[in-house]
Each structure stands twice: as C-alpha cells, then as structure tokens.
Amino acid sequence: MEKLIEVKNLTKVYEEGDSKTFAVDDISLTIDRGEFVSIVGPSGSGKSTLMHILGCLDRPTSGKYFFNGKEINSYSDEELAKIRNKEIGFVFQAFNLLPRLSVMENVMMPLVYAGIPESKRLTQCERAVDLVGLHDREKYQTAKLSGGQKQRVAIARAIVNEPAIIFADEPTGNLDSKSGAVVLEFLQKLNKEGHTIVIVTHETYVAESARRIISIKDGKIESDMKVEHQRIVSKDALIK
Amino acid sequence: MKTKDTLKIAVEGLTTHKSRTMLTILGIVIGIASIMLVMSIGQSAQNLILGQIQSFGPTLVSVHPGRRPQSLAGFTGVLFNDSLKQRDVDTLAQKTNVPDAVRIAPYVFTSTPVSFGSESYTTFVMGSSQDVFNSFHLDVAQGVALTDSDVASRSSVAVIGQKLANELFGANNPIGQNIKVKNKNFRVIGVLAPKGQMVSLNWDEIVLTPYSSLQQYVLGIHYFNEISVEASSLATVPTVIADITRVLRQNHNITDPTKDDFYIQTQEDAANTVSSITDILTLLLTSVAAISLVVGGIGIMNIMLVSVTERTREIGLRKSLGATDKNILVQFLTEAIMLTLAGGIIGIILGTSLGLAITYMIDKFGGLSFPYSFSLSGAILGVIVSSVIGLAFGIFPARQASQKSPIEALRYE
Ligand SMILES: Nc1ncnc2c1ncn2[C@@H]1O[C@H](COP(=O)(O)OP(=O)(O)OP(=O)(O)O)[C@@H](O)[C@H]1O
Ligand SMILES: [Mg+2]
C-alpha cells in the first residue's frame, strides 16, 4: 500500500505559564492511501491536536511529518494553504459553517480559494450536495438547517475538492444516533470509493465503523489495531 | 482566487451590518463632501474674479507707485506713495517714448462720504481722464461723460453710478445738481449705465471726477495712485513695460533696478495674484476638511478591527479551507477600501449638491452672477484620498486578520 501520511517522533508542546503540556508526545505512525482510521482516547489525550497537525492546520513543535512523501515542515504558510485546499478535507466537530451563507455557498468555499471557474464550481458543488442528500436544501441558509443536515453540509464541503484524505473530528459527536449513522454511512461510502478517512471519536460503535483503531493516552499511542469485523452501518438506521 | 470572489465576499461582509457600515463611512462622507464643497466654491469664486479681470482687457498695463507689495497689507502703501507725478504722465504720453502705447490714463482714488442734501453715502471716488470710459467700456445713461477739457480746466464736475444716483436723488433728476465730495461741491453732469461689480470696484456706486479736480480740491496732492497704459496689442505688452520702466527710471534718476519706486502690473499679474490668494484660501479650508478625513479613517480602522475580531472564527475557517494569508489580507483591505470609496462617492455627490444649492442661493439672493463649477480635481482627489484612507487605515486590521494561525482562530470564542 502507498503511504499517504508518515510522522516520526511528532511532538506538540503547549506552554502555559510554568507548566508544559505534551499534547502530542513522540508519536510515530503511518497511514496508507485508502485506509479508514479512527483515533480514540480519553478527553485531553491529544487526539484533536494530532489531527490538526496531520490536517496541516497546526505545526508540530518537533518531529517530522511527510505528506505524500514530502516533508511538511519545509513548506511555507502559503504552500500549506494550498495543500489544505487541494489535498485535505476537514470536517470539524463544531461544523464551522458560515451561518449567513447558503448550503451551496458554504460547500463552494474550497473551490473559490482553488480559483476554479464558476461553471465548473457549480457542477462540482451540486455533485457533493447531492451525495449528502441535501439537493432540496441547496439555497437554504445553513443557520436554518438541523444539526444532522449541518454535519452533512460540512462533509459535502470536505469532499467537494476530491481531497486525498478526509479528517473528521467527532463527526457524530453532536448528533443523535440516527443522524450519526447517516454520517457514518457516508464516510464508509467515501472510503469504498477510495478516499482515505481519519476520524476522531469517543464512541466505540463509531470507532468500529473504521478498519483500524489507534488509541491515544497522554499524547502517546497506546495501541494500534486492525478491526477484525468492520461494523457496517445499516441502511435501516438512515433517516431522511 | 478570483477578484470577483474577493469583491463578493467583501460585499457580504459589509452588508451584514448595514447600519454600522453606514455610520462608519459618515466621517469619510462628511470629509469628502466638505473638500468637494470648498474646492468647487473656491473654483467658482476664482472663475468669477478672473473673468472680471479678463474683462478689463488683457492689454492694460498699470503702473503703481512704490515697491511691489509682497503681502496683501502692502497694497495700502500705494495710496500714500507720491512717486508718480504729472511729469511722468506727460513723458509717458509722448509717442516717441512709448511708441506702442495707445492710451495713457492717470488715476487717483479715495473713499469718502458723498452727500446731497441730507442724504450721505460713503463711497469710492475716482479721479480720471476721459479715457476711463473707453478702458472700462462705461456708458453714460444720462447727461454727458467727462472730457479732457474738464481735466485741463479742473472743473468741479462728476459722473456718478446708477445706484448712487438712486440713493442720493431718488426719482429726481441728478443732472445739474451739486453733490458734496468731502464738503467740496461737484456738479453732476452724467449718470453711468448700470455696470455692476468688478472685483472690488462697484461701478454703480462710484463717483468719477477729473483727476486734476480731485487732486486739488479734495485730496490736496500732486501725485497719482496709478497710471494705466494700454498697449496696442497683446504682443506689444512686454515692449510697453520695458519702455515705461526705462522712462520712469530716467525721470526718477534711478540706476539701480532694486531701488525702483514704482512697479508695473499686467492683468495677467493681477489674475495670478487673485489665483494665488484663492488657491491659498482653498488649500487652507481643504486642509481643515482633511482633518475630518483622518478622524473618519480612524473610525474605519476601529470598525475594521472590531470586524476582524468578530470574524476570527470565519478567518480561521477560510484559512483551514485553503485561503492564504494574502487572500485574507486582500479581502479585508478590499472591505476597507470599499467602505471608504463608497464614503468618498457619496461625499462627492453630497458636496456637489450642496455646492449647487449654495451657488444657486448666491446667484438668486446675492445678486451676483455666481455659476457653479464642478471641481473635477476635487472629485478625483476625493476618490483617490478615500481609497488611500481605506488602504492606510485598513492595512493594520487586515494584517492582523491575515496573520492569525488557522487553528488559533478557529478556537477563538
Ligand atoms: N492551544 C492550547 N494551549 C494550551 N494547551 C492546549 C492547547 N490545545 C490543547 N491543549 C492541551 O493539550 C491537551 C490535548 O488537547 P486536545 O484538544 O488535543 O485533546 P483531545 O484528545 O482532543 O480531547 P477531547 O476528547 O476532549 O476533545 C489538553 O491537555 C489541552 O489542555
Ligand atoms: Mg478534541
């Protein structure tokens, strides 16, 4: 399998006054193209911090990060912005949609920064919105959507650029189990189509939807296992 | 990222808080409107005065006694300097001395009470030769004009302005009546046709007498306040000036040009003087207006900083989706410039409307022909200045926005 992500001795230290927090403490790991990984661990164990670094939203204090075989630390802020734009899709725990804008406008944002021509943008957007089943909500202000719909908009935005990897931080955290199932089903579908997926979660049943589980404690990897029986999210759980 | 998208996002940003946006640009609107107003009114005033000076005729050259005044106050020195005498007028009048001069006319003037019976009026009294009627295109509506024989015989006669005639005589016929000019009797022989104001001179209120009579009976002097020389054409003006200078230096035994006790002014000089005075006034008032622009700019900066803070999460999100520092910088700068530019354009429209209203009022109620002149330079300046203010006061907040790290910004509550 082709390596997509490789980190070596990754460390992120936060200094707050006298105390030092090793949010990520000497982590080394590899994620191949096409994998579906879930990161689990207690609150404050450093999952989000790790994910932000992997998602090129943050820089590590020390250690090496190779994305697609290239060392990230050598990139300028501008080049990182380009990688975030083209290679990475991020689904935030708190949705992070712009409430005044419509579904389409929110989903379109990565394409705007990619400088893609308007006509092409629309078709790409429509495809992503269709995929998450929000065709009839295209023109809605996202402020007026339900929690599950917002989460699906966030996913549409993450996949609209056809990124190599999608990171989803607690993608089901804000949702009831039915809406959560809808989201998980999408992620599994995307993974089947070849997208690499990394999710952070608290819940076991969510973690087991992936094919590999990495547990983290105090910034260190505690275990890293393949899932014997991937939990296929049933279609019956879907709500429309 | 495409420019169109930047503009679209900026418009979205600005229209979120419409009333705040409006209030923010008010300072710029007022500043630009005042600049527009000052510059166009200044321009109108300047055009008015210059137009009148031009109407004196560009071939007129005037010789004044004393040193060339360096300041406005210096002009009063002209009235008390006695260097220009009858002999100077006579020598200048000799064709061989100043061959290109077609007319030589000496003047004395004073401002003094003029009365008839119980009616008294302080006004401008000008002693001249008959040439004044040709030089200034004056028409006599009633009676006759002054003649050179009136000058030669020092007759106590006067031609008076239309308005003065009304003030002193009402409906009665002024011709043949004696008016008192500083207690000396002058017989009214003519009334001028209405002519109106010319720079500082109101022909409708003037008293014209032979210069010799005014010198002897009223002023008790033997010198002139001005000698007016008309050149044969615009081309001969420089030669005429050179000739006059030579003749007068000879008459006054002056060898060192820095010791000249007279100076020569063309209509162009006069126009330049007026222009420079109105220019200085306009500049002064414009700078006062500019202060409000600075205040407006600080208001813009303040609101932009607030906006950057409010939209920290939005900035973080945009960056996490691929916006570069430059994208964010340009976006906030665009917002700032759009704000100030909109303020500038509204200001130009407001300033123009106010200018039109004011000139209309002056025209209608001030009895002065005062056409509005749109100050194109004011408008261009307004557009440039407002954009520059947006740039100058927007750059700091925009930089603050662009330098936020995506994850820090997203974490902002
Ligand atoms: N910006 C920061 N400044 C200082 N300390 C931080 C910062 N961000 C995270 N930390 C600390 O780093 C540690 C890991 O935080 P992180 O958010 O990665 O945890 P997490 O595993 O995602 O927890 P949760 O499951 O609750 O989301 C925590 O102890 C947190 O207090
Ligand atoms: Mg977290």
Image (cartoon, coloured by chain):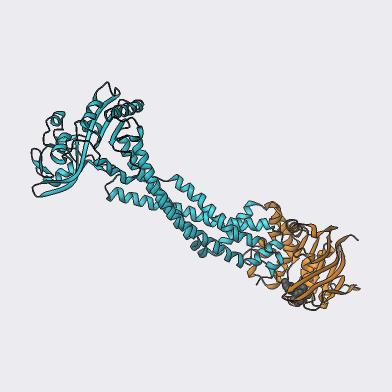
Q: Quadrant of residue A97?
A: bottom right
Instruction: Describe residue B375's horizontal placement relative to residue A140 as left or right.
Output: left
Residue A69 is situated, as x and y percent measured from the top left of the image, at 86, 58
The residue located at (28%, 46%) in the rendering is B368
Q: Is residue B236 visible?
A: yes
Instruction: Describe residue A114's horizontal placement relative to residue B353 as left or right.
Output: right
Q: Which chain is orange?
A: A
Residue A171 is situated, as x and y percent measured from the top left of the image, at 76, 71
Give the answer, above or below, for where B407 lies relative to B266: below
**Which one is in front, B361 or B64?**
B64
Number of marks present in the image shown: 0
The residue located at (62%, 66%) in the rendering is B311
Instruction: Describe residue B59's horizontal placement relative to residue B131 as left or right.
Output: right
The colour of chain B is cyan
Give the answer, above or below, for where B72 lies relative to B254: below
**Which one is in front, B220 or A90?**
B220
**Which one is in front, B329 or B5?**
B329
Residue B223 is situated, as x and y percent measured from the top left of the image, at 21, 35
Q: Is residue A170 visible?
A: no
Residue B361 is situated, as x and y percent measured from the top left of the image, at 31, 51
Instruction: Describe residue A148's horizontal placement relative to residue B337 as left or right.
Output: right
Give the answer, above or below, for where B286 lies relative to B226: below
Which residue in the rendered view is the most extreme toward the top? B96
Q: Quadrant of the C terminus of chain B?
A: bottom right
